[in-house]
Amino acid sequence: MHILAFGMTYLADRSELVAGELSGECVLEYFRDDKLVGVCGIGMRPTIQSYRTKFSLA
């Protein structure tokens, strides 16, 4: 099982489970003032990879 994250999850003031279950593979989105600042996943690598462009530096 892999852990993969993008963005700045440490800035978040809340998180939301958006896929899976906390007891297994899952994806969590991290927000600050209702703005998405990061995402982290346990397993579910293709789902996490889909967030990559939202957090890539231009």
Image (spheres, rainbow, N blue to C red):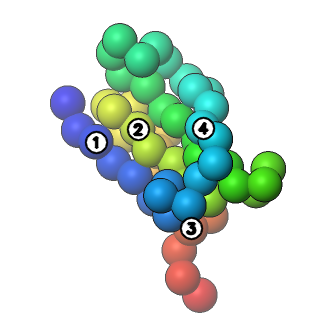
Give the CA distance from mark 4 to mark 3. 17 Å
Badge 4 marks a residue whose secondary structure is strand
Picture layout, residue 47 above or below residue 26: below
In-image side of 47 versus 43 (left or right): right
Residue labelled with disc 4: 15
| Sequence-first disc among 4 and 1 | 1
The spot of residue 3 in percent (x, y) is: 28, 42
Residue labelled with disc 1: 3
Q: Which of the 4 image quadrants contains residue 15?
A: top right
Residue farthest toward the right in the current orientation of the protein: 34
Give the CA distance from mark 2 to mark 4. 12 Å
Mark 2 surroundings within 10 Å by alpha-carbon count, few (fewer than 14), some (14 through 19), many (20 or more) = many
The spot of residue 28 in percent (x, y) is: 52, 35
Front residue of 11 and 39: 11
Residue labelled with disc 3: 55
The type of residue carrying mark 2 is Gly
Residue labelled with disc 2: 41
Front residue of 27 and 45: 27
* Residue 30 seen by the camera: yes
The spot of residue 1 in percent (x, y) is: 20, 30
The type of residue carrying mark 4 is Ser
| Sequence-first disc among 2 and 4 | 4
* Discs 2, 1 touching: Cβ within 8 Å: yes
Residue farthest toward the left in the current orientation of the protein: 1
| Sequence-first disc among 4 and 3 | 4
* Discs 2, 4 touching: Cβ within 8 Å: no
Mark 3 surroundings within 10 Å by alpha-carbon count, few (fewer than 14), some (14 through 19), many (20 or more) = some
Give the CA distance from mark 4 to mark 1. 16 Å
Q: Nearer the viewer, mark 2 or mark 4?
A: 4
In-image side of 27 versus 54 (left or right): left
* Discs 4, 1 touching: Cβ within 8 Å: no
Badge 2 marks a residue whose secondary structure is strand
